[in-house]
Image (cartoon, rainbow, N blue to C red):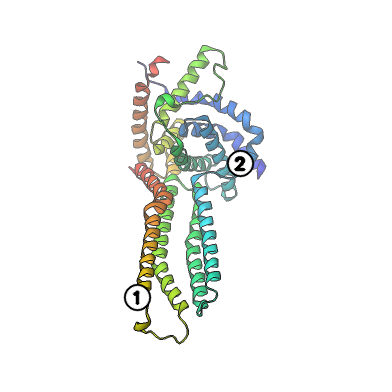
Amino acid sequence: MEEFDLNDAWKSGDKQAEEYYASIEPEVIEMARTRSKSILEELKRKVFWEWVAGVIAVGLLFFLYRDLPNYWVMVLFGALIMGLSSIPYYKMLKRIKETPTQNMIDCLGTYVEILDGFIKRLKFLMWVMIPIGFFAGLFASMEEGAKFDLDKIEWMKLLGLLGFTIVFFGILFWITFKWYLPKLYGKPRDEFQSMLDNLKK
Amino acid sequence: MKKQFKKIVDEHNGILYKIGRSYTTEEADFKDLYQEMLIQMWKSLPNFKGDSKVSTWIFRVALNTALTHQKKLKRNRKTSSIENLGFKLVSEGSAGVEMMEKKEAKIELLYKCINLLKRDERAIILLSLEGKKYEEIGEIIGLTTSHVGVKIKRIKDRLHKLLKENNYGRI
């Protein structure tokens, strides 16, 4: 059996390419100016909407806690959390924009770094900022000049609330770390890493 | 910018088509990817300062797009056996001569077998088939010239094996 001539077969694809291009040629500019459907563009959009949802959630908290005595603590904390969470989003969007023209190894490497960094920062924000937020909320709800009196504490109510809080945050953390983060960012990250490893082999 | 973009695409549309065919197995997926490559080129054009060849720039943008685009398509794909691959963008037997049909069958089989390679391997083999020198392939991929040579040899062997397994002798 004679060897398949790769170059000759590849060259014969030019005719198909010309015929296809002739059929779309008048609309090429319009096609190029439409909204991207690539996985990274979708990721960028999701990240943006996550940020918007965060702003709305913080705004809602401000509204709900507007009558608390130390309301300013919540405002300060909300502004801090939004500020801190905006930095990784901004950096991520900026770096994704720079990557298409890099060589393939650099491009894939940058994507892996972006996603790794993003996941780490998000974990940090959740592990650190949620507990801080919890205590900030407690502090904000304390009445001015209030004294700590063990006898006045309604233990059942307090334990019930504590139990609910632990379960609520347990579920929130589980969904975030076991499902949301791996599905949205972990899977593409692993695929990029796998391609990168193959290229370097 | 429109004129410059159009000129670039007019001159290099062949490679966009071939990358599209090498990374997709269905017509709808192909059209999506082709459009996505155009979108990314359009977005990247203002940042192109001419510090590399236009063809190098196109290959980088198009291949990076193809690599990332593939994942989205994979999610919707139910089967990947060679029997289910392949689509005709050109009407069957349009040339009307046996020689032309044979050539079309050959290129269709080649696309099908390239589709069975790993995604990163596809990028390297199609650059090689386009006749790019090792230096330029290295520049696009980010590998040294000697590494490119080793990889091309390995991938070509695998491709020939796949062609044999898929009975190219029948063509």
In the picture, measured across the screen, residue B157 lies left or right of residue B52, that is: left
Question: Relative to residue B144, is residue A75 depicted above or below?
Answer: below
Let me know if residue A8 appears in the view.
Answer: no
Q: Which mark is residue B75?
A: none
Q: Residue at x 56, y 45 (%)?
A: A36
Query: Can you give x and y, in whole percent of width and height, for residue A63 in the image?
Result: 56, 70
Neighbour class for label 2 at 10 Å: few (<14), some, many (≥20)?
many
User: Is disc 2 placed on a helix, strand or loop?
Assistant: helix
Q: Nearer the viewer, residue A195 or A5?
A: A195
User: Is disc 1 placed on a helix, strand or loop?
Assistant: helix
Q: Nearer the viewer, residue B72 or A139?
A: A139
Classify the position of the C terminus of chain A by image quarter.
top left
Neighbour class for label 1 at 10 Å: few (<14), some, many (≥20)?
few
Q: Chain of mark 2?
A: A
Q: Chain of mark 1?
A: A
The amino acid type found where label 2 is placed reads Ala
Q: Residue at x 56, y 23 (%)?
A: B90
Question: Relative to residue B26, is residue A176 depicted above or below?
Answer: below
* Residue at the spot of label 1: A155
Question: Relative to residue B84, is residue A88 depicted above or below?
Answer: below
The amino acid type found where label 1 is placed reads Trp
Residue at mark 2 to residue at mark 1: CA–CA distance: 64 Å
Query: Can you give x and y, in whole percent of width and height, for residue A15 in the image?
Result: 55, 24
Discs 2 and 1 carry the same chain letter:
yes
Let me know if residue B158 appears in the view.
Answer: yes
Q: Residue at x 39, y 66 (%)?
A: A165
* Residue at the spot of label 2: A32
